[in-house]
Image (cartoon, rainbow, N blue to C red):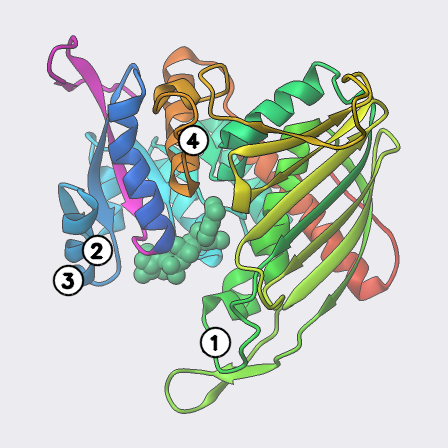
Amino acid sequence: MSIAATVNTGAAAAKPVLNVAMVGHAFMGRAHGNAFRQVNHFFDLPFHVVPAVIVGRDPERAAAAAHKLGFAESTTDLKATLARQDIHLVDVATPNDSHCAIALQALAAGKHVLCEKPLAMTVDEAKSMVAAAKKKKVRVGLWHNYRRAPATRLAAQMIARGDLGEVRQVRAVYLQDWLADASVPASWRTSRKTCGSGAHGDLNAHLIDLTRALTGLEFDSVIGVQQTFTKERPDGAGGTAKVDVDDALCFLAKFKNGAVGTYEATRVAPGRKNFNCIEISGSKGSLRWNLERMNELEVFLFADPRDGQGFRTIMCMDSVHPYAANWWPDGHIVGYEHTFVHHVADFVAALASGEPFAPDFQDGLAVQGVLAAVLESVKAGAWVKVRR
Ligand SMILES: NC(=O)c1ccc[n+]([C@@H]2O[C@H](COP(=O)([O-])OP(=O)(O)OC[C@H]3O[C@@H](n4cnc5c(N)ncnc54)[C@H](O)[C@@H]3O)[C@@H](O)[C@H]2O)c1
């Protein structure tokens, strides 16, 4: 796809523009929209990213969102948007059951695609997305944004250079409490038809991706247990709707290198808001990251001076740390929304350089394979091999 138009960004030389059409404009639409705007201001990229069009289902709501999020236009016509030569990147920020159809249409139109997680509803859908992306000379990415906090990036670097030795154990939890209250209404997130699974596809998907990103480990086999504590919820129209997805899902994992892992995703853990925490233990040390203290990395290495046996905490907002120098002077911290900005920055840089970008749809398929194997193991009450 040629990206011909240019924009004069001020003092700097004119850059080619990368026009973005974003489908969906609620929670993730706000996070992505912010990232598409902010990335130009903090990263020196080969393209000027332009939040061009919001595609919604209701014209008034889409127009209001475009105005608020800084997009030039809005529409309800996805087909017409995809037919436009001046749209280069399509961002899929809609519920899970629409990812595959929207991404396939965008790929068929020759657009680059960024898609929300989980990539798809099923392994077969995910495979069709991988195949479609391979057919076209376009780039694809998946919004597993937690890979791109300065602290998780540093963790990945430490593990890759061997600081922890051989990775032996992963313990990861993603805990929320917003469904602990039985009066919270049903939504697309509580119906298997629209989301595939509950806390599992929503939260374990992130933990699975984070494990792969930080350690490079590949899942071999899994066994899980799940529970739905509230089986019906108000439907918002005076009646009730069935809840047929998990409120909580825990699983054990064996990895190909012999390491083992424990995983827990829940939306019913009172007091836990967005407690996304991963601890990795190796033969020479351990590290731990928790989103609720996202700029800190806790590290214990046997090689460190033995003036005590505790973990030390690295504040990962020094200019030597990943992404930190793009923002503020040392120690001036960043937040949740910055992980999305980093995601766009890396994607756009990869687009220009031709370097690989991860996670792509192949990574999304790998995550989908683990998610599916866990659900199969819950049904079977037995260990299930993760298929590739
Ligand atoms: N990366 C993350 O950390 C993260 C966090 C939350 C959600 N998500 C993922 O992002 C996706 C969206 O979640 P959300 O929280 O933004 O949901 P949401 O309910 O807040 O927003 C969904 C948006 O999609 C629109 N929409 C629904 N169906 C559509 C269709 N067929 N065509 C066009 N627009 C449609 C809705 O009108 C709304 O604007 C989900 O796949 C979810 O799993 C990712």
> Is label 3 in contact with label 1 (beta carbons under 8 Å)?
no
Give the residue type that dot 2 points to. Answer: Thr
Q: Is residue 335 left or right of residue 302?
A: left
Label disc, if present, on residue 186 of the rendered structure? 1
Secondary structure found at label 4 = helix
Residue sitting at x 14%, y 49%? 67
The CA span between labels 1 and 2 is 25 Å
Beta carbon of the mark 3 residue lies under 8 A of ligand 1? no
Compare marks 1 and 2 and give the one earlier in the sequence: 2
Q: Earlier in the sequence, mark 4 or mark 1?
A: 1
298 and 69: which one is in front? 298
Return the mark for residue 60: 3
Q: What's under tag 4, amino acid-wise? A: His
Name the residue tied to disc 2.
Answer: 76
Q: Are marks 4 and 1 in contact (CB under 8 Å)?
A: no
Label 2: how many Cα within 10 Å (few below 14, some 14–19, many 20+): some
Q: Earlier in the sequence, mark 3 or mark 1?
A: 3
The quarter of the picture showing ligand 1: bottom left
Magenta segment = 1-26
Residue shown at 50% from the left, 32% from the top: 149
Rounded to the nearest angstrom, the CA distance separating label 2 from label 3 is 10 Å
Magenta stretch: residue 13 in it?
yes
